[in-house]
Amino acid sequence: MSVFVFGPVPSRRLGRSLGIDPVPLKTCNWNCVYCQLGRSVPVTNERKDYWPPGQIVAEVRRVLQTRSEREIDWVTFLASGEPTLHASLGRMIRDVKAITQIPVAVITNGALLYRPDVQEDLMAADAVLPSLDAGTAALYRAINRPHPECTFDRLVNGLLEFRRAYQGKMWVEVMVVKGLNDTEEALRDLAGLFHKLQPDQVHLTTPVRPPAEPWVEPPDEQGMQRARSFLREWVQPEGPGAGIVKLSGIESLPDALVAVVSRHPMTEAELLRLLPDRSREEVHRALSQLLESGRLQVVERYGQQFWASGRSRYG
């Protein structure tokens, strides 16, 4: 059973991504209104070894030994919280790069990039994908609801400092939320920051999976057109994604289902595509048992039912 490693899962940004999750669920210094994993209760900004780093790397090695490198495009640290809160992140990145030629990425909110130790930890990664959803302190607090120590000035200054020193790819993610940061004013403020930051790419995403707060909605087409227009200098056109990625060779279907949806809530139809060697009845039966035991829950958003961790807390 894999505790820290999951996938590979399809990603529009990273193709077939083998995920590494180094912190417990919702160990995060942000409490974003759009988070697909629910609310951070409470937010935390303590940096420590939440799990033994050697144990995490050993699991990565074991999983990589069972798969061809052709099956994986990126090995990605993307916590079900904030990965830079793990104090040994840098060591783990270097250890993973020592055992595979697959490039390593880190998906982070970027809130701790003002810290020299975090900047140093991320230098070994081939790509770093921080978030920047707001161009003002007020909108930052409204969307990301950060820990009091994670101020807007620290976020912006950390991104700028890291950009000047980092030699890898810096791909910034913007989650576009209807009525919050899809207005002309909000996008003009964001564009001003990107002129200073000059990232390699900007990836626009929308809350298509169950957001923490039920009132959160993806922007309409006009809102997305505004975002593409204001940020056109850096926006990367959406790719076709990684196609169908299969979860093969799994020992326990319930454990595999929990591992995936605890980091990436999915509909039953999406799970069936990940498990083509399992029958619909088998998957449905496992989901029903996990629902009854409390390990999973069903969250309804946008007229769809998503399977998510039973420990996640949604509004």
Image (cartoon, helix red, strand yellow):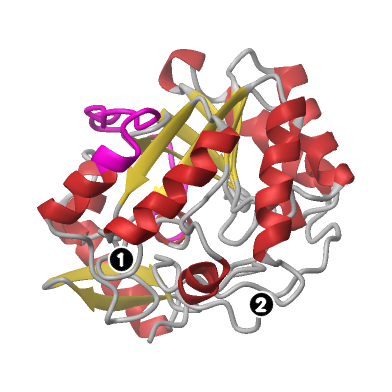
Seen at 11% across and 52% down, the residue is 221
Q: Position of residue 64 (x, y in %)?
A: 59, 26
Magenta segment includes 199: no
Q: Is residue 225 above or below residue 213?
A: above
Quadrant of res 245: top left
Q: Position of residue 224 (x, y in %)?
A: 20, 49
Kindly identify the amino acid type of the residue bearing the numbered disc 2.
Answer: Val
Seen at 12% across and 53% down, the residue is 222
Which mark is first along the chain, 2 or 1? 2
Seen at 22% across and 77% down, the residue is 300
Q: Which residues are magenta?
A: 228-255
How crowded pointer 2 is (Cα within 10 Å; few <14, some 14-19, many 20+) is rated as some
Q: Nearer the viewer, residue 232 or 64?
A: 232
* Callout 2: SS: loop
Q: Nearer the viewer, residue 40 or 271?
A: 40
Q: Which mark is residue 286?
A: 1
How crowded pointer 1 is (Cα within 10 Å; few <14, some 14-19, many 20+) is rated as some
Q: Is residue 191 left or right of residue 239?
A: right
Number of the front mark, 1 or 2: 2
Q: Quadrant of the C terminus?
A: bottom left
**Residue matched to label 2:** 43
Q: Nearer the viewer, residue 100 or 279?
A: 100
